[in-house]
Amino acid sequence: LSVGVSLYPEHGRDPADLLRKADLALTVLWRSNELGLRFYSEEYDRRLRSLGELALSLDQALQDDEFEVFFQPQFTMDSGMLVGFEALIRWRRKGEFIDPGRFVPLAETTGRIAGLGEWMLERSCMEAVSWPEVNGKRLSVGVNVSIPQFHQAGFVATVGRVLSGSGLAPERLELEITESVAMQSFESTLAKLGELRAMGVKLALDDFGTGFSSLSYLHRLPFSKLKLDQSFVRELHSSRPQRILTEGIVHLGSGLGLTVLAEGVESVEEFGLLEAMGCDLVQGYFCAQPTP
Ligand code: C2E
Ligand code: MG
Ligand code: MG
């Protein structure tokens, strides 16, 4: 049970205002994934205002050219060969970077992610076309796709249009999708992923192990890469259960024929442990930061 509460007369005297404030308290409670009782606070109204302002400035930002694409390289673990890059969005507003962890979810919940995502896809593909081959191999570009963006009608057509517009070979594009994509409607998700695969586009399962992972998705959905979430990497040293889980996931992925990439690798110790477990690829500050 979740209850938002506002008090008369402390929070207001007008019934509509009191109800709005109780509702806001309830929303804050839900957002924090808690149950129980939450009293209204003026702080919530301040937060709401600044989120609203941020959402509005998102619209302006595309026109004002405030977004940039940064690229973070991915390497093979055994030979240290460069195989591709993940494209990461950056928003520079008045000289300061705003955390994607803040504005991406906001863009998702306020219906602005499709435009932003399409811009990212276009920029990333256009950029990747000009990359040289490395040891005779073509470099891949990973682009993140939000769940609402993926479920939009016309998403597959957009990807096709961007590919032909940029001239990027479809095999070089890798769409990164989180496992929660399949939570809503498995059959339509499967169909859409199938269409993308048929175009030649590669699919990577992002942040694996953090959502409501259903292991059966691993082989029922046409992914070719599994990106082990960095929360596993962070705890490799401190937690034996986490180490065992990580090793299990790596074996599971490899056994199913997926390429396993470890995300957020920051130290030589982490690198060593993951390599010994049989991870194929690595991405993280230990190798390189995302750069323009
Ligand atoms: P993600 O897709 O899992 O991206 C990896 C995140 O880990 C990036 O954060 C990257 O900068 C960070 N990272 C890489 N190596 C390390 C490391 O060694 N240590 C640590 N602590 N972090 C590392 P970033 O760029 O802040 O992006 C955060 C999330 O925002 C992304 O997670 C992705 O879910 C989302 N995002 C970023 N760009 C886009 C985009 O263009 N579209 C969509 N839909 N989401 C995006
Ligand atoms: Mg990603
Ligand atoms: Mg990730």
Image (cartoon, rainbow, N blue to C red):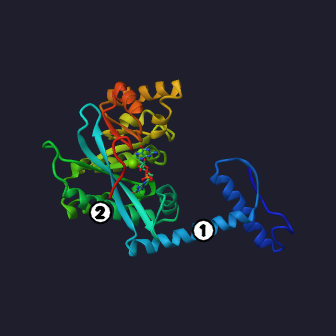
In the rendered structure, the answer to whether residue 71 lies left or right of residue 112 reads left
Query: What is the quadrant of the C terminus in the image?
Result: bottom left
Give the residue displayed 37% in from the left and 72% down from the top: 65
In the displayed structure, 41 sits above or below 220; it is below
Residue 130 at x, y = what percent? 18, 58
Asked if residue 200 can be seen in this view, the reply is no
Provide the secondary structure element on which disc 2 rests: helix
- Residue drawn 67% across and 57% down? 28
What's the mark number on residue 50? 1
Residue 50 x, y percent position in the rendering? 60, 68
Q: Residues within 10 Å of mark 1 (few under 14, many from 20)?
A: few
Q: Is residue 65 above or below residue 161?
A: below
> Residue 34, position in %: x, y?
68, 47
Q: Quadrant of residue 82?
A: top left
- Vertical placement of residue 104 versus 240, above or below: below
Amino acid type indicated by mark 2: Arg
* Depth check, front residue: 221 or 279: 279
Q: CA distance from mark 2 to mark 1?
A: 29 Å
Image mark for residue 123: 2
To which quarter of the image does residue 228 belong? top left
Question: 199 or 114, which is in the foreground?
Answer: 114
Provide residue 185's location: percent of width, then percent of height.
46, 48
Question: Viewed as shown, does residue 97 lie left or right of 278?
Answer: right
Classed neighbour count for the residue bearing mark 2: other residues with Cα under 10 Å, few (<14), some (14–19), many (≥20): some
Identify the residue at image location x=43%, y=72%: 61
Q: Is residue 24 visible?
A: yes
